[in-house]
Amino acid sequence: MITITGGKKIYSIMRKQILLIIFPLLFLAPTPGVGNDDVTGKAIAIDGDTLRIGSMEIGLYGIDAPELMQTCKTRKGKLQQCGDLARQSLAGLIRGRKIVCEGLRPGPEGYPTALCFIGPININENMVADGWAMADPRDGKEFVRAETFAKRRQEGLWRGTFQAPWEWRLKN
């Protein structure tokens, strides 16, 4: 039989050891809304590259769609509201469906951005492939192939003439 004397001292040593183990683990825990969490639910389209799930606005990572007030021209030179058409395209795609947005990360506009899906369908890529958004040059080349596809098929914006959203924002 072992007799332990100085119980307070052993308790203090054990407490320090436990804290040394647990404290670093706190930094490995997911931080809500930044990089680790998924957001799931029905969404509404704010514009062509932003949606809202519940009270959270989420930008579609890697893409840039025309601003709501941005116009473009058809092949025949007719002016159209391409920003609103991009929003309508996103709204039609997500309407009434369960959306999962993965890999939330801070975005350039102050709200998080993510890759968002309807089942296996990548919404971000779909908006670019349908021609209603462009691959965002700030985020690498993830959607350049989808953009090339839309250009070749003259989908969405590529049916006429338009200004890249980032260029339009600089001028307006």
Image: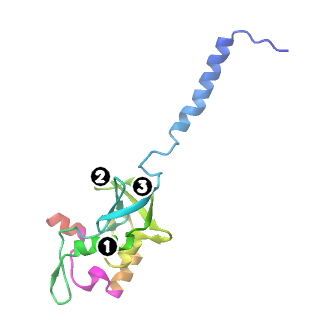
For the residues labelled 1 and 3, the Cα–Cα distance comes to: 20 Å
Span colored in magenta: 153-165
Would you say 68 lies left or right of 53 here?
left
Point out residue 130 in the picture as x, y percentages from the top left corner.
35, 79
Name which of mark 2 and mark 1 comes first in the sequence.
Answer: 2
Quadrant in the picture for residue 80: bottom left
The residue at which mark 1 appears reads as 133
Q: Is residue 116 magenta?
A: no
Mark 2, residues whose alpha carbon is within 10 Å: few (<14), some, or many (≥20)? Answer: few
Would you say 47 lies left or right of 26 here?
left
Q: Is residue 156 magenta?
A: yes
Name the image quarter holding the C terminus. Answer: bottom left
Mark 3, residues whose alpha carbon is within 10 Å: few (<14), some, or many (≥20)? Answer: many
Amino acid type of the residue that numbered disc 3 sits on in the rendered structure: Leu
For the residues labelled 3 and 2, the Cα–Cα distance comes to: 12 Å
The residue at which mark 3 appears reads as 104
Point out residue 75 in the picture as x, y percentages from the top left corner.
20, 88
Point out residue 68 in the picture as x, y percentages from the top left corner.
21, 68
Image: 22 above or below 95: above
Image: 71 above or below 16: below
Would you say 107 lies left or right of 172 here?
right
Image: 156 above or below 48: below
Point out residue 43 in the picture as x, y percentages from the top left corner.
37, 62
Residue 97: numbered disc: none
Residue 110: numbered disc: 2
Which residue is pictured at 47% across the width and 52% down the height?
Answer: 37
Which residue is pictured at 23% across the width and 72% down the height?
Answer: 84
**Closest to the observer: 136 or 81?**
81
Name which of mark 3 and mark 2 comes first in the sequence.
Answer: 3
The residue lying furthest to the right in this view is: 1
Amino acid type of the residue that numbered disc 2 sits on in the rendered structure: Gly
